[in-house]
Amino acid sequence: MNWESIDEYAKKWIKEAGTMIRSSFDKTLNIQTKSDPNDLVTNIDQETEQFFIEKIRNTFPGHQILGEEGFGDKLTSHEGIVWIIDPIDGTMNFVHQQRNFAISLGVYEQGIGMIGLIYDVVHDELYHAKRGQGAFLNEKKLVNLKEKSVNEAIIALNATWVMENHRIDHNLLIPLARDARGTRSYGSAALELVFVATGRIDAYISLRLAPWDVAAGAVIVEELGGIITNLRGEKLDFVNQDSLLASGPGLHSTILHDYLKDGKW
Ligand code: IPD
Ligand code: CA
Ligand code: CA
């Protein structure tokens, strides 16, 4: 498989999609809701996904596609080459703020992440990694993640997870939020993952993400020695929804062992 060529096309298309999204800023959005009144989708999310699907189908007809908006294939496994697309990650930010969102594009082979691209459209910043070849922000090579203790770490997590909720005993995460140097929440999993990759934050925690939220970011973070698992310390399968703990090496095991009881909750 010519991964150079796949990578070149993916980068070209993600930039083109970014240009289209930027030019939508002064047009009226068609906004609809999905699973609940706060789960937003716009015509731009849908058109962007359709743009990628048309390009991929024409250029790589044998590849499979998993896209958030449902225009791709119905996947039950990761046979062959699979493109995993979130056309706009952070749609609520896109609608309310016109910033703090990104396009997320991962390309996997037999379930292994080969290419990860996350494009911060507003800042024209493309985070990209090819398996085994380093991770970059535009042309700049990113450095490997360093060990951090919790009390010098900034940890991104949503306030929902430290309030009573039906996914985790919130009493587990309260001490972590208290012990950390600071907490943040940006509203885009893809951006939170590249913030881990660049050391702007040190860990990102979520109780429920879909494959398209994580696929590209996982390639980038792992390329820098970071660790991506669910909150029980298990590998993700990139087919089903799961929780997420993404961070540098030392901090990952500290959070898992000292706060999450090795996932035995
Ligand atoms: C959402 C964002 C958000 C995360 C949600 C995701 P979307 O993606 O990544 O930060 O907390 O779980 O669904 O819907 O904006 O693509
Ligand atoms: Ca998303
Ligand atoms: Ca999305």
Image (spheres, rainbow, N blue to C red):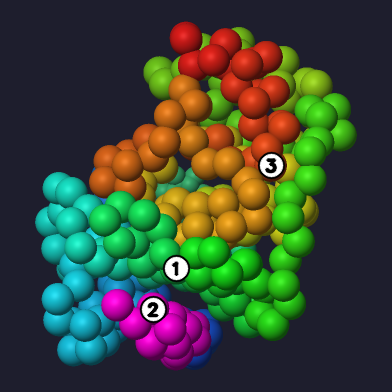
Q: Residues within 10 Å of mark 2 (few under 14, many from 20)?
A: few
> Which of the pair 219/36 is nearer the observer?
219
Q: Is residue 229 above or below residue 254?
A: below
* Disc 3 to disc 2, C-alpha distance: 27 Å
Q: Residue at x 40, y 18 (%)?
A: 166
Q: Nearer the viewer, mark 2 or mark 1?
A: 2
Is 213 part of what is drawn in magenta? no
- The quarter of the picture where the N terminus appears is bottom left
Where does the image place residue 124, in percent across and percent down from the top left? 63, 82
The residue at which mark 3 appears reads as: 248
Q: Amino acid at mark 2?
A: Trp
Q: Amino acid at mark 1?
A: Ile
Image coordinates of residue 70 in percent, x first then y, are 20, 62
Q: Is mark 2 within 8 Å of ligand 2?
A: no
What SS does tag 3 mark? Answer: loop
Instruction: Look at the image and give the residue range highlighted in magenta.
Output: 1-18
How far is mark 3 from mark 1, CA to CA?
20 Å
Which label number is shown at residue 115? 1
Q: Quadrant of residue 240?
A: top left
Disc assigned to residue 3: 2
Q: Nearer the viewer, residue 248 or 101?
A: 248
Counting every numbered tag in the picture gives 3
